[in-house]
Amino acid sequence: AALKAAADADKEGPTIFDKIVAKEIPADVIYEDDLCLAFRDVNPQAPTHFLVIPKARSGLTQLSKAVEAHKGLLGHLIYVAQDVAKKEGLGEGFRLVINDGPNGCQSVYHLHIHCLGGRQLTWPPG
């Protein structure tokens, strides 16, 4: 029931990320499996900047909309992010960012993980 309620959040129609998954919009894909897709950000904020997204939103328009049934997928997305980061030469370190909601500066309501690296990142962000 909770997963169905979360999926109701998908009623806004396809996002740009849904269109990338459907191959309606081109992207520089660097990883793909049955559950997720990783591709380079079109507006990179670091020398290496890619996104990892679930192929199906399944209610994951925001991290704060996650339900217990999403735990496996969320773990998979983070695992893929670190694996792709290593393959992209970010063995010295990288940052994963998930923006959530308006105050978190989320611009696309389809959960996505930013992976940034390739230079010394500073703290605090934003």
Image (tube, helix red, strand yellow):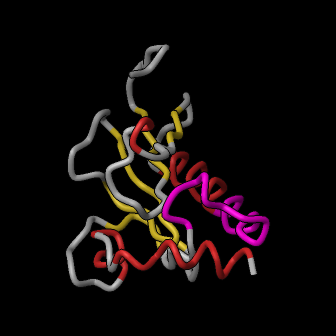
Q: Mostly what secondary structure, the magenta segment?
A: helix
User: Which residue is more in the foreground, 103 or 63?
Assistant: 103
Q: Position of residue 48 (x, y in %)?
A: 35, 41
User: Which residue is more in the foreground, 80 or 99?
Assistant: 99
In this view, the residue farthest toward the right is: 68
Judge whether residue 87 is colored magenta: no
Check the image and report above or below for 77 versus 41: below
Give the residues drawn in magenta, as a range.
60-76
Q: Position of residue 68 (x, y in %)?
A: 79, 65
Q: Position of residue 63 (x, y in %)?
A: 58, 54
Specify the quadrant that holds the N terminus: bottom right
Q: Position of residue 59 (x, y in %)?
A: 56, 72
Check the image and report above or below for 57 versus 103: below
User: Which residue is more in the foreground, 124 or 60?
Assistant: 60
User: Which residue is more in the foreground, 109 or 9?
Assistant: 9
Check the image and report above or below for 112 versus 37: above
Residue at 48% x, 64% y is: 53
Check the image and report above or below for 114 versus 108: above
Residue at 52% x, 34% y is: 95
Specify the quadrant that holds the C terminus: top left
Residue at 51% x, 79% y is: 56
In this view, the residue farthest toward the top is: 123
Residue at 69% x, 77% y is: 3
Q: Number of callouts in the render?
A: 0
* Residue 3 left/right relative to 13: right
Q: Quadrant of residue 75?
A: bottom right
* Residue 33 left/right relative to 40: right
